Image (tube, helix red, strand yellow):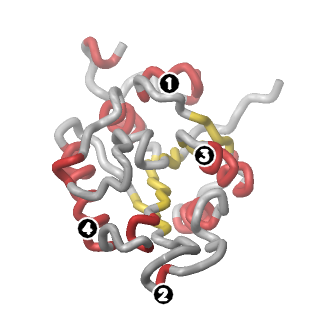
Amino acid sequence: MSRKAPLKAVFFDRDGVLNLDHGYVCEPERLDWIEGAREAVARLNAAGVKVLVVTNQSGVARGYFTEAQVDLFHAALQAGLAEVGGRIDAFYVAPHHEDAVDERYRHPDHPDRKPNPGMILRGLSEWALAPEETVLVGDKGSDVEAARRAGVEGLRFPGGDLLAFLRQSLGERFPATGLGGGARDR
């Protein structure tokens, strides 16, 4: 079996992977972190691995919230990550849906909306990444399918502790250190 390329970036779905999915979440006060998510991101950052978020946000198309509100939620994610020394390097958002109330977001099958690979392909291009240097972590079949279409390994997160899941799923590709030791670094 051939050895896998060193990990240079991880694409994460947002809702259900980094934060709890309460259904159309965009209010910062409704941000509830998935266990181990902030520590996992900080560990990846400390090891020089890029962290990129690819998220369908059809709530924009459906008129539930605006792109500006999505940006505010992402700012809250960044603030929460900064508390543990982490950050997200880029957010890729697909606000489209075939039933959009706003014509700007109406599309029958937008190339960015997962399971289409548009956001992943853009991330690969903008960060000069090869697919074999990346993985995508999502909680739905559409996330894993988008990864497959982009030529990227897709991991389906079943819930629970994201840090433990990444350690187990990525094995030696997951950074062994990064948070300065202690109980959280075991």
Residue 103 badge: 2
Sequence order check, earlier mark of 3 and 4: 4
Sequence order check, earlier mark of 4 and 1: 4
Query: What amino acid is at disc 4?
Result: Gln
Sequence order check, earlier mark of 2 and 3: 2
Query: What amino acid is at disc 2?
Result: Glu
Is residue 131 visible to us here? no
Sequence order check, earlier mark of 1 and 2: 2
Mark 2 element type = helix
The residue identified by callout 3 is 134
Query: What amino acid is at disc 3?
Result: Thr
Q: Nearer the viewer, mark 3 or mark 4?
A: 4
Q: Nearer the viewer, mark 4 or mark 1?
A: 4
Measured along the vertical axis of the image, is residue 167 above or below residue 37?
above
In-image side of 29 versus 41 (left or right): left
The residue identified by callout 1 is 165
Of 52 and 141, the residue lying toward us = 141
The residue identified by callout 4 is 69
The residue under the point 66% across, 50% down is 147
Q: Label 2, label 3: how many angstroms apart (C-alpha)?
A: 34 Å
